[in-house]
Image (cartoon, helix red, strand yellow):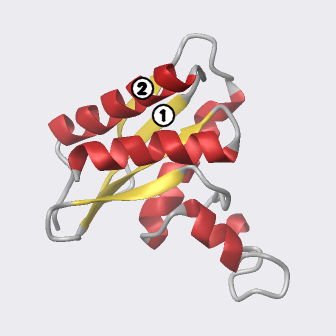
Amino acid sequence: MNDLTLDQARTALDAALRKSQDMGVKMDIAVVDAGANLKAFARMDGAWLGSIDIAVKKARTARYFDMATGEIGKLSQPGSPLFNIEHSNGGLISFPGGIPLTDGNGVVIGAIGVSGSSVEDDHAVAAAGVEAIS
C-alpha cells in the first residue's frame, strides 16, 4: 500500500494554512494517511472547536470512499443510492471540504479535511493542500 509521508502531509497542511490566511478564514485542517489515520493537524488561532471533529471526519470520509466529500453528498440525498451513508463508519461528513490525496500515479495515499467556514471556502482550502503535493 502506498502511503502519505510525513513530509507530504506537512506540505499539504502548510499549503492549506497559507490558503486560509490568504482568504482571511480560520480553519481546522486534518490530513490522514492511506489507512485514514491522522497524520497532521492544525487548528488556527480562533478556529471553531466544533470544526476539529468535522475536519477529521471529512478527511476520513474522503479516504474511506476515495472521493471528495461533496460528491458523496450528492449521492446521499433522499432517494439517492447512498442515502443515510453519513450514519456509517462512526459518522461521516457528506458536504464539501474533504478531498483524497494521490501520488503521481493517481493512487490514493491519504486525504485532507477542512472545516471552519462556508463549505465553498472549506473545499478551496482543501484543494490548495491537494495541489501542493500533486
Q: Residues within 10 Å of mark 2 (few under 14, many from 20)?
A: many
Q: Residue at x 33, y 32 (%)?
A: 15
Q: Quadrant of the N terminus?
A: bottom left
* 2 and 68: which is toward the camera: 68
Residue at the front extreme of this rendering: 22
Above or below: residue 78 compared with residue 36: below
Tell me residue 99's x, y (percent): 45, 56
Q: Earlier in the sequence, mark 2 or mark 1?
A: 2
Q: Secondary structure at mark 2?
A: helix
Tell me residue 81's x, y (percent): 70, 89
Above or below: residue 73 compared with residue 82: above
Query: From mark 2 to mark 1, how far is it between C-alphas?
Result: 8 Å
Label 2 is placed on what type of residue?
A: Leu
Badge 2 vs badge 1, beta-carbon distance below 8 Å: yes
| Nearest-to-viewer mark from 2 and 1 | 2
Q: Residue at x 51, y 63 (%)?
A: 68
Question: Count the marks: how many?
Answer: 2
Report whether 45 appears left or right of 103: right
- Find residue 79 and report its image quarter: bottom right
Query: Which residue is tagged 1?
Result: 29
Tell me residue 87's x, y (percent): 72, 66
Question: Which numbered tag is attached to residue 17?
Answer: 2
Q: Secondary structure at mark 1?
A: strand
* 118 and 47: which is toward the camera: 118
Tell me residue 27's x, y (percent): 56, 27
Residue at the right extreme of this rendering: 78
Above or below: residue 68 compared with residue 81: above
Q: Residue at x 62, y 55 (%)?
A: 96
Report whether 93 appears left or right of 111: right
Label 1 is placed on what type of residue?
A: Ile
